[in-house]
Amino acid sequence: MLISIWKKYKYQLLLVISVLVILYPLSLFIYVPKWDNINGYLPYRYFISDYLWNGHLPLWNPFQQLGYPGYADLQSGVWNPIVWIIMLFGKYTINSLIVELLSCYVIAGLGMFTLAKYLYNCEKTALIIALSYALSGFMVGSSQLMVFLIAVAWFPWIIYALLQFFKTYQLKYQLLTAFFIALFVTGASPAYTIVLAYITVGMFVYQLILNRSSKKQLLQLMVGGITTLFVLVLLIAPYINSFLEFSPYFNRGDKLGYDKFLLSNPFTPISYLSFLLPDAVISKSDWFNITDLSLRNGYFGLLGFAVMLSSVLSKLTRTKIILYVLFCFSLLLAAGGETFIFEYLYHLPGFGVFRHPSIFRAFTIFCGLLIGGYEIKELLEEGVKKRHKLVFSAILVLLLIAGVWAISKTSFSALRILIIDVINFVEFSESALSTHILLNVSVALVLIIGSFYLMKVFKTSLFVSLLLFVLLDFGIHTRISTPTTVCYPIKQDGFAEFFKKLPQEISQKDNTTPLKKLDENQGLIKTGGIWRNVSTYNKTLSFVGENPMRFKTFDIAKKNGALEKTIEHSILYFQNGEALLKNPIVGYNTFEANIENTSNKNQLLLLNQNYHHQWSAFYNDKKLPAKIINNLIIGVEIPENSKGKILFKYLSPKTPYLMVLSVLTYLLLLGLFLYQKLRGK
């Protein structure tokens, strides 16, 4: 049984094993992921799992910035099946985050393998391309941004399913396209969803133009496209609904100004050094300061870069030309405001609402590897040709020039210190740019010489030599970059203990404390590496926190001083002191208290949470109209001379039904795919 599985899937298994071995600090649960993964995606997911495991839908998170609808958080994975599966095993903790992050690398590799195998009909070529994609500079350099990695992971699967659909018009590939897009959309950054929409529509339009003379094929395309869209809507129905319910309040629903904030973190020409010298962009150098440390790396392998260049000298096909155009176009987009291209596209729907132009380098890497795949297949089938020798010689000359320059600027003792830093898992090396370049050049030369030695002395096949070259290339550079861009030098077991200490129920101890004192420094359980959203982990109230899904009114109140005034009060309070409030309780999607209004006038009771029209108030089980106060929080009028219980409840009536619809659609699709698999189709 095992032998037959190995024979059938040996390249895929080798791919997965290689990726996990190279990422051993994560796969062995030694260290923890860093930055946004820990301070953003982990607390968002922890909140969701905590609510679900306590038997409640994660509708409202009261622990950040006066609360927000957690089920509408597009970066929380709340509607993503991968996150669902992980949460079946318990609350989402640090181990869950590590598993989900590793799944991005594995899914990316398997997706690129499937696409490359389809395009080249060569599993050996597909393996090399897949390894280069899964461990590219984007995947390693931007590891802290898991929602970016999710997009890159599912993208090749979507392209594969679309190409198969355009070729066969089969229902299976229409359903697969919807399935993969749903996994992409519900997990990835919304910025990538916008870009994917343009890519998908562009591919459909291109097919319509190609088949414009055939009414039958045009009809098949239209019917297939409508089917795909219909199934996709069923799969992501709760995602769509949750966003629509929050969109009137969303602080990022409008276009951003065409300024430095929008254009921050471009992939500038200086970062092109990473195509050959990936270690350079993590060095301590002012050259790269225009772009964040995690958004500079565009490496897709020394081999990948070389074969992409050599492909220019080979026979050009329509597919290659399209890929080259897309390669250059994505590179220009990644430069942001450094070129005029982004300024024009800024006016398109959706293009002005997300930042970080460097995200487009993911498509540069994708296209570059697909171009190079044709050359790798030819190399494996026909051997090394003159153009390959020419390009490899040119790259070797560039490496030698870079090495000579680096030696003139640094020393071998400095290089030794850098190597020791890498071995000791030092997070940020103090070594200069020249030292990193010298290390990079040394590694490249050793690998090149070693590959030739293997072929000449040990007579290894070209495939084995290239595979070992790629494995060592990405293995070494990933290890060098891991302490800086992938993992904190913080042990996983410490984080595991942190999660064991967290409270099981929502804290009630600060319910009468003015919110201005609840700034995440009031004796909360903490651990190294976490400096944001500590209140979410501790399930305690807070007016601070970090989340891009903020209320527009909250941001305005922060600027005009209204927030400063409201946080002078506790979570529930009367506007004046003529009424009494006792035993306030923060519940799951609810707030309640016992109140008594002894006045002969109605009294305004305020809930110190962001106003949303889906908040309802019940006084002694009778519904009271809730209204927005100070253009920020929620208020209700308590009748004169009355007492009883007030209950605020956040409701989303459609969500449970749409959630069931989505789950059933996923299960139906999985059942159909399994049925076809068992039938051998």
Image (cartoon, rainbow, N blue to C red):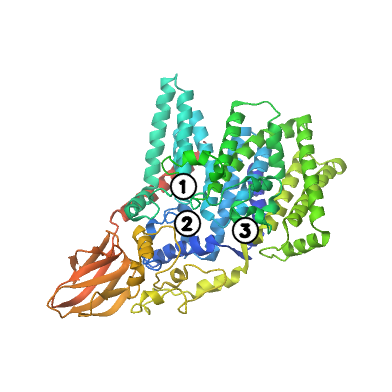
| Closer to the eye: label 3 or 1 | 1
Q: Is residue 629 above or below residue 178?
A: below
SS for tag 1? loop
Tell me whether circle 1 and circle 2 mark residues in contact (CB < 8 Å): no
Decide which of 73, 667 is in the foreground and name it: 73
CA separation in Å, label 1 and label 2 = 35 Å
Query: Residue 540 sits in which quadrant?
Result: bottom left
Q: In this view, does 70 lie above or below 366?
A: below
- Name the amino acid type tagged 2: Val
To which residue does mark 3 refer?
485
- Name the amino acid type tagged 1: Tyr
Q: In this view, does 574 lie above or below 157?
A: below
SS for tag 3? helix
The mark nearer the N terminus, 1 or 2, is 2
Picture disc at residue 258? 1
Query: Residue 10 sits in which quadrant?
Result: top right
CA separation in Å, label 3 and label 2 = 23 Å
CA separation in Å, label 3 and label 1 = 29 Å
